Amino acid sequence: MVSSDSCEGCGFRWSSITASEIPARTSEATEQFVVVVLSSAPFVNNRPAPDRWSILEYGGHMRDVFMSIRERIVRASIEDDSVGSPIYRDERVDLGFYKFDEPEDVAIELGAMSRLFVKTFEALPPDYEERLFTYSPISNARVTLLWAGAQALHECEHHLGDVRENERLLNA
Ligand SMILES: [Zn+2]
């Protein structure tokens, strides 16, 4: 399993999350995230510090996180002991895969991928939340589908905090 149960950045605790709260909380965080993407036009591409992405890059990342975790969940539902594909978060940005992203596109894509993730998670057959798989060949962490669902929620709430911090830093 993963070594730590709480995020140092935002305090999220994976073990405190139940399957039933993931859909509504994820949808709520996504809605707020989309509002930030659409309302920060003057500085949506600005990185307020070298170690931070822009609001648009965080939005693109979150869109891809939903796609990535959804695929891991589908595969782990079918294959025993599957291994998820790593997301390579920084490489996607560094190789320019987000360079054609526009706020209006990212807002729609983020909403759609969040919805797709939520629908998939809600559709899991009974007891599938406890199926185990390897989240990534890089970390080798063995996790349940419930943990993966909680991780999608965590990423969304955590990066919602990041884009709000960007707003604060760039408005200062
Ligand atoms: Zn966090």
Image: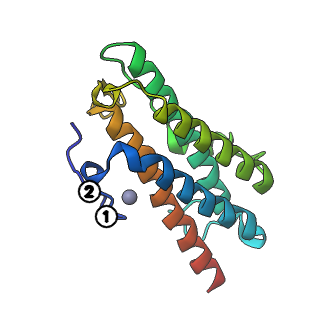
Q: Nearer the viewer, residue 146 or 167?
A: 146
Q: Is residue 25 placed above or below 66 in the rendered structure?
A: below
Q: Which residue is mark 1?
A: 11
Which amino acid does the dot numbered 1 rest on?
Answer: Gly
Q: Residue at x 29, y 25 (%)?
A: 131
- The residue labelled by disc 2 is 6
Residue 73 x %, y %: 44, 28
Q: In the structure shown, which secondary structural element does the residue marked by tag 1 occupy?
A: loop
- Specify whether 49 is left or right of 82: right
- In the rendered image, the residue lying farthest to the bottom is 172
The three-letter code of the residue at mark 2 reads Ser
Q: Earlier in the sequence, mark 2 or mark 1?
A: 2
Q: Quadrant of residue 6?
A: bottom left
Q: Are marks 2 and 1 in contact (CB under 8 Å)?
A: yes
Secondary structure found at label 2: loop
Q: Front-most of 117 and 57?
A: 117
Is residue 50 something one can see in this rendering? no
Q: Is mark 1 within 8 Å of ligand 1?
A: yes
Q: Position of residue 113 (x, y in %)?
A: 62, 40
Residue drawn at the location 72% of the way across and 49% of the way down: 106
